[in-house]
Image: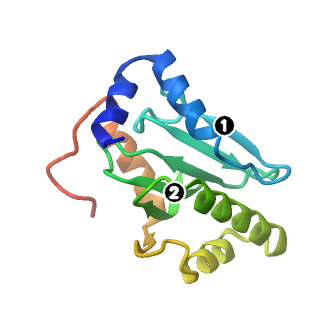
């Protein structure tokens, strides 16, 4: 599917979004004890046609999988910590095996270290992205800017993030 196809589902209403999200979620494994949730309306910001979040039992962070669409031409895999985005992992092709590996690896690192900075540092140090590099973002400023810049809009702004 192209980003435009995803946006057609996004614009098609709750039923279409629900079906698309369920198709994505059926391929994903949830680490033991973790919760999985998804967005069907705009409860998680409404930016992406598909957004699935994995949350460990302690709830200190989420791992989000976001579909292509107006915001990004590729899948985005990110860690969210209290509204901050310590990193985003662009995924050129939807690959449930790789996504399940990353969430499983994050769960093992969380159990071993318990520190989000250790998890981010380890995942960024591994070549989990193949030929697409991980992007380290300035956490405190990123999420508010995304929400204020994109909520309710279907196009990207003229200026890039700074």
Tag 2, which secondary structure? strand
Q: State which quarter of the image contains the C terminus.
A: bottom left
Q: Which residue is mark 2?
A: 77
Q: Residue at x 38, y 45 (%)?
A: 68
In this view, the residue in front, 65 or 1, is 1
The quarter of the picture where residue 43 lies is top right
Residue 64: where, in percent of width, then height? 57, 50
Q: Which residue is mark 1?
A: 37
Q: Relative to residue 71, is residue 14 drawn left or right?
A: right
Tag 1, which secondary structure? strand
Q: Residue at x 48, y 52 (%)?
A: 94
Q: Relative to residue 12, is residue 94 drawn left or right?
A: right
Residue 80: where, in percent of width, then height? 57, 55
The quarter of the picture where residue 114 lies is bottom right
Q: Residue at x 65, y 38 (%)?
A: 26
Q: State which quarter of the image contains the N terminus.
A: top left
> Marks 1/2: CA distance?
15 Å
Residue at the left extreme? 158
């Amino acid at each position: 599917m192209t980003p435009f196809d995803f946006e057609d589902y996004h614009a098609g209403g709750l039923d279409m979004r629900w079906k698309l999200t369920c198709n994505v979620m059926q391929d994903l494994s949830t680490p033991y004890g973790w919760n999985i949730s998804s967005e069907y309306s705009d409860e998680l910001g409404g930016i992406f046609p598909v957004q699935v979040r994995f949350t460990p039992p302690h709830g200190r962070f989420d791992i989000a999988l976001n579909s292509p669409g107006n915001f990004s031409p590729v899948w985005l895999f990110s860690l969210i910590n209290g509204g901050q985005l310590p990193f985003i992992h662009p995924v050129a092709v939807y690959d449930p095996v790789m996504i399940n590996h990353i969430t499983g690896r994050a769960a093992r690192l969380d159990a071993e270290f318990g520190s989000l900075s250790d998890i981010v540092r380890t995942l960024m140090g591994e070549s989990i992205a193949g030929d697409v590099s991980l992007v380290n973002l300035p956490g405190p400023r990123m999420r508010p800017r995304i929400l204020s810049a994109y909520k309710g809009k279907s196009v990207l702004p003229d200026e890039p993030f700074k």
